[in-house]
Amino acid sequence: MLDVRPALDAAAAPPVIRREDYQAPDWLVPEIALDFDLDPARTVVRARLSVTRNGDHDRPLRLDGEELELLSVRVDGEAREGRIEDGRLVVDIAGGGATVETEVAIAPEKNSQLMGLYASGGILCTQCEAEGFRRITFFPDRPDVLSRYRVRLTADKARYPVLLSNGNPIEEGDAGEGRHFAVWEDPFPKPSYLFAIVAGDLACNRDRFRTMTGRSVELGIWVREADLPKTAHAMQALKDAFAWDEEVYGREYDLDRFNIVAVSDFNFGAMENKGLNIFNTRYVLADAETASDADIDAVAAVVAHEYFHNWSGNRVTCRDWFQLSLKEGLTVFRDQGFSEDMGSKAVQRIDQVRTLRAAQFPEDAGPLAHPIRPDSYIEIANFYTATVYNKGAEVIRMLRTILGAERYRKGTDLYFNRHDGQAVTCEDFVRAMEDASGIDLQQFRLWYSQAGTPRVRARLEQANGRAALHLSQEVPATPGQPAKQPMVVPLRVALIGQTSGREIVGERLVLLRTGEQVEPFASVSEPAYLSINRGFSAPVIVEAERRSGEIEALAVSDTDSFARFEAGQELMTRDLMAAIDGAELDPSAVVAAVGATLRSNVLDAAFKADAIALPGENILIEKLDAADPARVHAVREAMRRAIGTRLKDDLSRAYMGASRADPDSLSGEAKGNRRLRGATLSLLAAGDPALGRSLAARQYEGARTMTDRQSALMVLAMLGGDEAVAALDDFYRRFESDPLVIDKWFAVQASVPGEATLDAVTRLAAHPAFTLANPNRLRALAGNFAGTPSAFHREDGRGYDWLAEMIVAADKLNPQTAARFVAPLGRWRKIEPGRAAKMRGALERILGEPGLSKDVFELASKSLG
Ligand code: TRP
Ligand code: ZN
């Protein structure tokens, strides 16, 4: 017997993996048969691999393995001594191929990392992306080794009546001694990261979908019996996603079955395993009483995302993990398109950009900046980032903008057809786009290799009936990339007449390609305002020279709804930053713009809700060099108070109007109204706490949706006092048995601004319902606390200490999830020196911990850097 552990020596820094070192696999595995004898304490896994030598070489077969107890090895039926070198099983093979059989034992119930085979609330399930398969059996665990899988599962019939794997069920039956078995076969060759099994006592919401060629696909969403009523939204989204991908991308589903399983313990949102998606319950279970509108929308988006991976990820997969954005950027772009078509395009776009600014811009400006196709990593799990996902999606969006919708579609058709069944690179994707469109994308490729958010300066000059747009760009230095080349920046631009308020120059696409460039506009009859980066056509920071009154005007009259939102944000940012820098706060321009928005008869409720919200404190901090988070908070609150006081009547009217939303409807209008209700309540409370308290208490008590209940609870929690305590107690008792709602209870309390929140989170970490073992619960508490600047950035640095202790404690159980909380400590460069030193101190203490995972080691060491 042999116990194989990861080859991480605590003293030495873990090795760096580089993209340029890629080598094709020495051995291929066209077929694998797996046999699981399932037991939570000790599961025995037998694997039979048919291996073939790839190319002309004499190297042995090397199989990845991690925390496997090796029981036996056979080659062509003959027993072999198991030889482990550098944590891999080495098998000498004489000829061009062989049958290699291994037998290992694993302990799912002890698997707290949630990678490989693990137990979640009585369900046995797997997570293999990126490198979890090696924790199940010995295998060349890399995405360019594609195999056909045949899987046999045997388990106790009473505890695990349902046995699932990828592909199609081909056999099942009794196995004696209270056990039963099932055999699944997946006809599509796939990389090991897409392998999955599930065993559990699960109920199924069944439905079917008829594909574009008339095939019938059996759909199943598997959950605990009690959760069945909460699966309707996910099922509807699944059918919508099937139809959308046929219509918009011409992609049809390929198996006879599509199963989704929901589990409570999951490191990420969900996983696209072929024919057997495994989901965090958070992105499956939803009804109006327990899930907010935002949660319900997220369910639909994630269901669609994982479904779309069947083509962008599974049929065409990644050659190596540096190519991750090949599948993730493209699939996020596809799920964004789905959400835009199912809801309101304008509101979706604002939300997408909000996410990008809050999560990706800071990453791109900090010590962890990396291109969407990274050049190196220590732990690949650390590169499932907002850059790879969300900036990756923006890059695909720019491609579509530059090519036009039709040529873009030709490009994806060519990509999917040319590379079906292959493991390919980002370069292959760009080449398909080039070949299909005839457009040279040489310079565009820089978006894949250069990190950092480009800054674009814009100045409109106007004289004698003509105008000229002067543009310049600069790509900032990032770690490892001191000097940058100019990128292709597609900017949608229009000119709006100062007096007419109309588009006097209609929208056009300007491709900024050089460091400096001038774009001429002929016959501009009227003084013009510049509407630029409309629809957020490029993921850049635009600094436009503005005339007096220009952004105020655009904030109410820009003809592009995103640009109008953006002008409002620019206006708010300008006046907040001036006050943060020491000027006296002048809220008049912001109050006027917010008032005009509230009173508008043409804007819809959802847009109003977005447009009246001030930019978040984290976004403001990003724009500063030595931010004092307490001051940022105080100034922003003062602005909110001014809006709440001076626009009390407009806000009250909007609040009352929005309150008429039909609680049983999920229409865009009803959702928009609930959103506006929350946004106006929050501002009313800032202006008049007593009024806010009574409105929020009434809203909380009368709430028929989680959207209304949660927004009221947040306002009450921020205001504090007896009402807050009463509402939080009520909320807990009401939803005690629903873990996803209890996550909200933790999240709300951890998101309350101010230094006192540390005491709350310290208390909550000791609450019986808190556990480090469940990623959702940990994120609810630690993630929200670290994301609330005025709470996290206490002057005494104790917020940092608290987070560092959480990271160290969580790292012992689940390194992947623990590592996700390191980044907030790495933002020290943007914070004033006193706090920054304390943030560095916390990072140093983390690094001083013995036995640190390479996940946390990589991010903490780079963050100090
Ligand atoms: N591919 C998954 C997605 O849809 C990401 C994912 C799921 C993941 N589980 C994971 C990544 C665990 C790392 C670790 O985006
Ligand atoms: Zn994905």
Image (cartoon, rainbow, N blue to C red):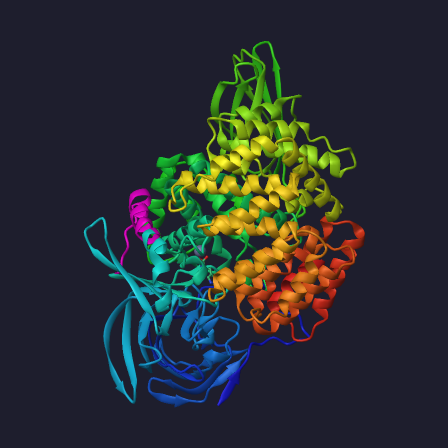
Q: Position of residue 208 (x, y in %)?
A: 24, 57
Picture residue at 27% right of the left edge, 85% below the top: 175
Magenta part, dominant SS = helix
Q: Quadrant of residue 462?
A: top right
Q: Position of residue 138 (x, y in %)?
A: 44, 77
Q: Is residue 825 visible to us here?
A: yes
Q: Is residue 573 above or below residue 752?
A: above
The answer to whether residue 46 is magenta is no
Region in magenta: 237-255
Q: Position of residue 448 (x, y in %)?
A: 52, 47
Q: Is residue 444 above or below residue 599?
A: below
Seen from the viewer's position, the closer of residues 116 and 49 is 116
Seen from the viewer's position, the closer of residues 543 and 205 is 205
The answer to whether residue 242 is magenta is yes
Picture residue at 43% right of the left edge, 49% below the top: 297
Q: Is residue 529 above or below residue 843?
A: above
Picture residue at 56% right of the left edge, 52% below the top: 713
Quadrant location of the C terminus? Answer: bottom right
Picture residue at 45% right of the left edge, 70% below the top: 141
Q: Is residue 438 above or below residue 188?
A: above
